Amino acid sequence: MILEMLTVGPFQENCYIVGDKNTGNGVLIDPGDEAARISLAVEQTQLEIEKIVITHAHIDHVGAVAALVDEYACPVLMHAEAEPMLKQLPTQAMMMGLRFGKVPTVDRYIEDEEIIEVGGLRLRALYTPGHAPGHLAFYEENAGIVLSGDALFAGSVGRVDLPGGNMEVLMKSIQERLLTLPDETLVYSGHGPRTTIGEERAHNPFLRGGLL
Ligand SMILES: [Zn+2]
Ligand SMILES: [Zn+2]
């Protein structure tokens, strides 16, 4: 498996290039900004990008999608419940004093538990709302990794003060869909460094102290 993390843009968002080294098939997850840098990194992996997958429609995760669709002519996949927020990207940008170019078009909706195949890789979609509507994480069981988007971070959890955020819903998502994964599962988040499920179960202050 190939897994490259690029931290992009003013929000220091983690974009992931994931692919099957043997078949050359690749996927981009959350290309949030700096399209040119992402495409240069893709070139170095020699992967053929066949789809772009979005964990949730916050501006820091989708800013480079439209530009990269132009480059790879590939479909964009996301959960249906994230669509209203995607449509509001220009408003999101304005609220943050940013400008937003083209709102990307989503070609297909991903459902909970759906398997996204990338060569021999099988990314299982885990419906994990609470930080944002229609938030998805992606679990590759054989590789022992989960791309957790903005649901779970090393030592923290996603913020819930943005539209559609809800702490109770987020805690339920994390407890039922992420902390149920094996302890040794590597967690690649939308922001910050890599961690493991076991580490977060034991030490994440947001997941202790009886919040549930
Ligand atoms: Zn977010
Ligand atoms: Zn984010």
Image (cartoon, rainbow, N blue to C red):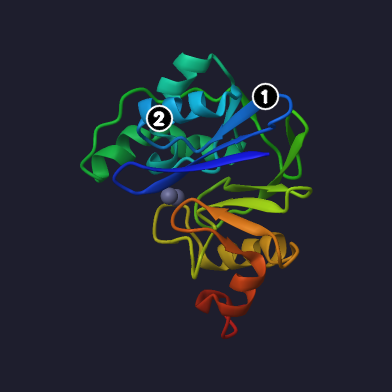
Give percent across and percent down for residue 72.
52, 16
User: Quick check: 96 left or right of 87?
Assistant: left
Give percent across and percent down for residue 207.
57, 75
**Residue at position x 65%, y 52% from top?**
146
**Residue at position x 25%, y 45% from top?**
96
Nearer to me, 38 or 63: 38
Name the kind of residue labelled 1 in the image.
Gly
Disc 1 element = loop
Given this view, does label 2 or label 1 mark the residue nearer the observer? 1
The residue singled out by tag 2 in the image is 64
The residue singled out by tag 1 in the image is 24
Q: Residues within 10 Å of mark 2 (few under 14, many from 20)?
A: many
Nearer to me, 52 or 176: 52
User: Quick check: 100 left or right of 71?
Assistant: left
Spatial separation of the CA atoms under disc 2 and disc 1: 22 Å
Q: Which quadrant would the N terminus be assigned to in this image? A: top right
Q: Is residue 46 above or below residue 59?
A: above
Can you tell which quarter of the image residue 18 is in? top right
The extreme left residue here reads 97
Q: Residues within 10 Å of mark 1 (few under 14, many from 20)?
A: some
Q: Which quadrant would the C terminus be assigned to in this image? A: bottom right
Which mark sits nearer the N-terminus, 2 or 1? 1
Disc 2 element = loop
Name the kind of residue labelled 2 in the image.
Ala
User: Quick check: 118 left or right of 160?
Assistant: right
**Residue at position x 62%, y 64% from top?**
196
